[in-house]
Image: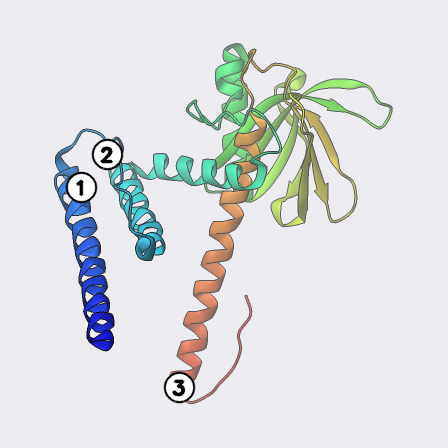
Amino acid sequence: MRYRRMRAALIILRAYRRYKVKSYIREVNRRFKNVRSMKDHGRHVKWPTPPKVLRRFEDAMKSIYNRWWAWTKIKGLSPEETLQVRAKVASLEALKGQRADLGLQRAWEGNYVKRDSPDTASSFTLVSSELQRKDKFMRVLFSCNVRKINRFHKAEDRALLITDRHLYKMDPLRQYKPMKNIPLYNVTGLSVSPGKDQLIVFHTKDSRDLVVCLQGMVPANESRIGELVGTLLSHFKRLIHHCEALTEQRQHQHVESGVCVCVYV
């Protein structure tokens, strides 16, 4: 009789656990059944409390849902908007908790010299076109009027033009004449402060770092440090991904031909 009672208790316990699991899954299915037609795609829907045995399952389900929700938001973006989202994600990953304002709430324009200096925009456009023909860059990543701190600790008005291949320092008082040209592969890192200032340091292989401040001609309450850092990080990530894909493709071609050779790009 004691054995029968224990066995009956176990059967009842297992049945109850199955009931709780099935009830939870049915409730999740009921609440999220029509999320595709909801305006916010179910962001307002409250998750039911899972039984203890399904807590890890709930975490996995929330992760799947969040990825799906993000996909619904980005699938309709244009190529330019997609690049901007990737740059903002890169900026957030690098500077989250380090700076208070990354400028994530506004649209990132990238090319600010034309907007900030409409009177001299034609000169900047002409010089940019000449540099594009000369250096064969594909697009402008970022441009901005800046204040440069020289070796004598004096501030001078300058302009910064960053393309997918080079970083140019220009003189806005001389029709944006290029004063310095740094290939992007010579840039080894960036340094920014945790404060609200717009100071940024470009570290280079030859240790001739470029120190500029974006605050000189930037409108009030518009931080561009996050945009500059995120844009460069996103650009280099795309280059690395492209190189890795090309390397893998070449390695696969060598293996298929019967020769195993490691190719490094």
For label 3, the residue is: 257
Mark 3 and mark 2 lie on one chain; the one further toward the N terminus is 2
The residue at the point 25 percent across, 41 percent down is 48
Evaluate whether residue 80 shows in this view.
Answer: yes
The residue at the point 82 percent across, 19 percent down is 154
Q: Amino acid at mark 2?
A: Val
- Secondary element at tag 1: loop
Relative image position of residue 130 (x, y in whole percent): 53, 33
For label 2, the residue is: 45
Mark 2 and mark 1 lie on one chain; the one further toward the N terminus is 1
The reply to whether discs 2 and 1 touch (Cβ–Cβ < 8 Å) is yes
> Which is more toward the observer, 147 or 117?
147
Q: Is residue 158 left or right of residue 127?
A: right
Relative image position of residue 170 (x, y in whole percent): 65, 26
Q: CA distance from mark 2 to mark 1?
A: 7 Å
Of all residues shown, which one is farthest toward the right? Answer: 152
Q: Is residue 199 above or below residue 48?
A: above
